[in-house]
Image (spheres, coloured by chain):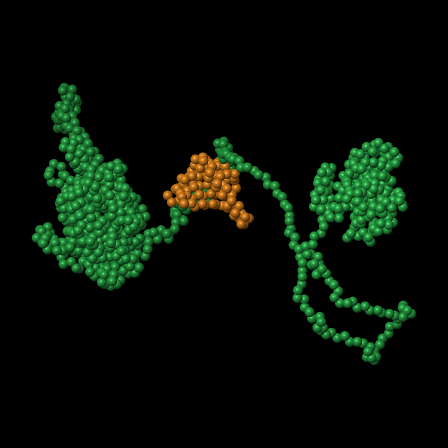
Amino acid sequence: MASVGTHCRRLCRDLGFLPSLPPALLRLTIATSSSGRKPSLHRSQEDFGASDSSSPAWSHRVGPGSPGQAPLLLYLQQRLPPVGPAAFTFVINVVTPAPGHGGKDEVNEEVEPVNMEVMGHPEIYPLVLTTKTQEIFNCRVDEDVTDDQPYKLIKKEDIFEDFKNRGAISDFHPVKKVIQEYPGDEILLVYDKDFKYGLNFYVIGTEEGKENYLNPPEVLEDQEEYKEYSSEEVYIYKAPVSKPWISLGSEKEIEEESVNEATKQTTYMISRKRRKFGAPIKFSDHNASSIKDAYIECTAYPDKNFTLQQVEKDVGMQVIPQIKDRGTQTRWTYPKNATTQYYPREFSEEEKEAVGQSKPFADFFDNVSVGVEIALQQNEIMNTFIDDWKCLAEEEGTFVDKTDTQLKEYQSFTDLHSPMEKMITCVAWHPTIYGLIAVSVAVRLSFEDRVLNSGKLLLQPSLILLWSFSDPIHPQLMLEGPDDIFCFQFCPSDPNIIAGGCINGQIVMWDITAHADRIENIKSGGGRSKKPILKPMFLLEPDSNKEATYIRHCAVSSIENGHRKVITDIHWLADTFEINRMGAVFENRNGICCQLVTCSADCTVCFWDIRPQKALLPQTAEKKKEEVIEIPFDVPSTFLHLDLSWKPLAKVRLSKGETSVDHCPTKISLNESHISQTPDHMVAQDRAGKMEEINPYQNLEGGMAGHLKPIDEFCTKFFVGTEEGEVIYTDWKLERDPETGRLMSKKPVSMHTVHDGAVHTIQRSPFYNDIILTIGGWNVAIWKENVMTGPLLQSCCAPKRYTSGHWSLTRPAVFYVGREDGYIDIWDLLEKTHEPSLSQNICITMITGIKPWPSSSKQQLLAIADHFGTLHILEIPWTLSHPSSNEVSSVQYYFQREVKHLEYVAQRKVIRDKEIKQINMEKERKRSKTYQKSKEQIEAGLKLDYEQYLDLEKTTLISLGLLKISERRSFIDML
Amino acid sequence: TEVEETLKRIQSHKGVIGTMVVNAEGIPIRTTLDNSTTVQYAGLLHQLTMKARSTVRDIDPQNDLTFLRIRSKKHEIMVAPDKEYLLIVIQNPCE
């Protein structure tokens, strides 16, 4: 309505006059004399343009609440020609919409009824019925027609009668034509309460419209309406239409909430006499007690009716989420590479000079130099920040007394059960298990006695005893060999495999894998109890330990093809390489040690491979089978393939050259530079663990040399110590004799006879791979590989013969030498190089073996075996086990110095020779020279003598007075 | 000159590796070391000294830095600051 009003007002204003009424009451009717049924605007305008008369040119009805009129009006406004309002006339009726206002509007007489086609209802013809007409047709507002039934059917005849009675003033006059043309008898008159179509009533001009109204097909109509609306393109604004209210139950709540009076209201009527109204009142004091009922006491008392407590309270609350809109704009900057190069600010030379000459500069120096010099001097005098305590600790170390240099007896083992007198031939610590040491024992007999007693000896088992710290009486294991074992070594890859060399030239293999648990347990038991000596195993398990456990060897080498004399040394080759029959070196793919080298008194050095050879003849295999039956079942089959058929892989003869007598090796030492040093315990244990899973020695295959990569730069030279006291540096690689084509061992690179007895120790330093200690006879020598002019150090002859020796494992400058009188000499190269720095008596007999073992960082043990079969375990004192801070380098330096000295000595010979030659030449030359010059010299000498004689004669004559001076002159003249 | 003599004397002390004089802006004036080392030492030690000086002064406004000795694993660096110049000496104390 407001919009319509506004538009109307605008229209009116544009046309030149404004209605003074408020828009709420505005009802505008624009009348026109349009004759067409459909007052479309074109038509209207045409009419408007054509009928230029004083009468209303066109009319249109504008009802409030009909939004469709708004665009019409706008359109109208646009299309109206801009002419002054005086040129034509509008009739605008302002009608107040109040109901019951029966004032008849001034509607122009017209013939054509106006329908509501614009609003989509061409059958509806709105009209105004006055109250009088309503009475006539019994359709009074709010009485006959109500909200509930807003329509009434009126008979056609009644309307015609009304036409007759009232003529043109009949309210139905505008729709007379419709009624006349209406096909039915009854016309539907609808009360338009809301002035939907502009007037208070409307008639429906068609029978279908009537039917539709009485039985509304709502949906269809709505759709139609919608279509109609959407088809209107000029539609601009659509005001929100209020929707009918749908009950969702809230009215019930409101009803419940509303308070109704439960009790009936009490009505009091108070009356008073008229005359008493407004009478003056006079107040005075009164005694309350004097008059009865003068006061009423209202004492407070609890009323039971009002003791109700509020139990429940209904509180409603609505939560509205707070929403805030915020916006931020971030600027995106893309990264860019940028560099800045700058150079330092510097003074030019002139500027520097100028500054240097300035007075403040000199003053500055005066001020500052003193302090700086003091500081410099302080630093020169002593290092202020040195940690004295730390240095002290380094010096002193633990609580151990530094002056204590004596070896202390820790434990000793003697095999009490053996009836024969035995000596220890070889000692070896178990590589991984703490406190387990193996010794090989041999009957202490000379060769002749041995031959004599050979029958007796056969009954004796030849043994390697494994001692544990936990049991000083019973050996943990006894490895049985075919004959007395003179040397043995644990396999570096698997400590359960032991290789030994016998006096008869056989090599023996043991596999103690089956007994590994036993010795492992000892280890753990010993480790747990702090004092293993106090809790020996035999006390805990007397039964299991009392009986001696002999472990049979699992393989021996063939008697025919091996060594013919006692094996004096045996070594496992490192797991990094292997050699073939020619002595050529190849890589080792197995990663485990599987080759051995032995030397024997039969003047040969042999290499052995523990893997089965593929080239074995089938008959040997058969032979082996037979042997399998013979072998007791408790022997592990690890090296079954080798047993009694094992042949050396390569054999190197140590020939002396022209003479038929060969060198007799006692000890050998191979260059093990390819070993990544001796595997530390972790690795070894790890390997041992692996071996438990799959014992690689169980299924070793022969190395195919052709497939293996040769190691070219490998040094195949090795040191050999001989029985005659020679130290030979030779090559194991065989070469072909150019004449015969036979394989020949190479000639030794160098050979020195420095020892005056059999060499029994030839050992590389654990710190320097090229430093070798050799001990033999009565002296000690230290060599450097590749410096073969002579030993770096050669001690003078000791009073007693040396019998064994070993490098210290932790101090590079220290080695131990055992003597035949039971003393042990400890050499410390940093202290003395001409004699041992310390000697200590261990036992009464010859020391046959020395083996140190670093059991822990604090404790180091030294195993010393003697000729009487006793194994002494001694504790190495702190000073001998812990190197000083730079001992490695200082000893290295010492060796270098010695090398230089040797070079100098070698050179000196040449120099001396030269010098002697020169001296001789000089003498020669001198001699010849004197001979040439002699004649002249003699003549000159004779002349000189004669003149002297003349002088003497003259003086004598003068002194005698026989001659005068003048005469003398004359005499001389005379002459 | 006297300055040169002083410098020579300092340089002749045992273990002295280098000596340099730097002005208040960290620009080297005299040095016995090569250029790049000098520039590095000058720039860094100048900053450090300024920081040290401001630290001392911030703690007590009446105090001032007189000498800065930096002991490192390899050397000792001594810085003698003054109003306008710094004298830096690098010494190997345990030679």
x 72%, y 40%: residue: A228
- Quadrant showing the C terminus of chain B: top left
Q: Is residue A530 left or right of residue A181?
A: left
Task: Give the chain ID for the green colour.
Answer: A
Along the line of sight, the residue nearer the viewer: A753 or A764: A764
Q: How many marks?
A: 0
Q: Is residue A163 left or right of residue B68?
A: right
Along the line of sight, the residue nearer the viewer: A136 or A332: A136
Residue ranking furthest to the top = A974
Is residue A18 visible in the rendered image? The answer is: no
Position in image of residue A313 (x %, y %): 67, 63
Image quadrant assignment for residue A66 = top right
Position in image of residue A589 (x %, y %): 28, 42
Along the line of sight, the residue nearer the viewer: A107 or A685: A107
Is residue B69 visible in the rendered image? The answer is: yes
Q: Is residue A219 above or below residue A523?
A: above
Position in image of residue A78 (x %, y %): 78, 35
Q: Is residue A324 left or right of residue A77?
A: left
x 35%, y 53%: residue: A393
Along the line of sight, the residue nearer the viewer: A758 or A778: A758
x 53%, y 37%: residue: A335
Say which colour chain B has: orange
Position in image of residue A215 (x %, y %): 73, 48
Image quadrant assignment for residue A907 = top left
x 73%, y 44%: residue: A239
Residue ranking furthest to the right = A275
